[in-house]
Amino acid sequence: MDQQIDIGIQPDNQPYEVTSFARKHGLTIPVADAVLFAKGPSPSRAACDTAALAFLCAVAQYAKKQVPR
């Protein structure tokens, strides 16, 4: 009984699909596409996840620096 169950986890060497990457990190499609594009052709999923986290941290830091009007 060697059945494999697909639970939607892809190997790290498989590129992300833009919409699933955007959904996973709470990004818009254009932003997710830009992050994936910035990482170059077929990077690891871990590298893309790290890039998304860095982007979200940068946005949060920028938002903290904004002076309320």
Image (cartoon, helix red, strand yellow):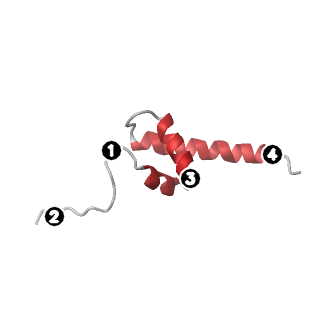
Query: Tags 3 and 2 in contact by the CB under 8 Å rule?
Result: no
User: At 76% from the left edge and 47% from the top edge, which residue is drawn?
Assistant: 64
Residue at numbered disc 1: 14
Label 4 Cα crowd, 10 Å radius (few <14 / some 14-19 / many 20+): few
Disc 2 and disc 4 in contact, CB within 8 angstroms: no
- Residue lying at the far top of the rendered structure: 40
Badge nearest the viewer, 2 or 4: 4
How crowded is the residue under tag 3: few (<14 C-alpha within 10 Å), some, or many (20+)?
some
Earlier along the polypeptide chain: callout 2 or callout 4?
2
Dot 1 or dot 3, earlier in sequence: 1
Task: Locate residue 20 relative to residue 65 in the image: left or right.
Answer: left
In the rendering, at what x and y percent does residue 10 appear?
32, 51
Under mark 2, the amino acid is Gln
Reading the chain from its start, which is encountered first: label 3 or label 2? 2
Instruction: Identify the mark at residue 27; answer none if there is no mark.
Output: 3
Q: Secondary structure at mark 4?
A: loop
Amino acid identity at mark 3? Leu
* Measured Cα–Cα span from mark 4 to mark 3: 21 Å
Q: Which residue is mark 2?
A: 3
Q: Secondary structure at mark 3?
A: loop
Of labels 4 and 1, earlier in sequence is 1
Q: Which residue is outermost to the right?
A: 69
Label 4: which residue?
66
> Of label 1 and label 2, which has the lower sequence position?
2
Mark 2–mark 4 distance (CA, rounded to whole Å): 54 Å
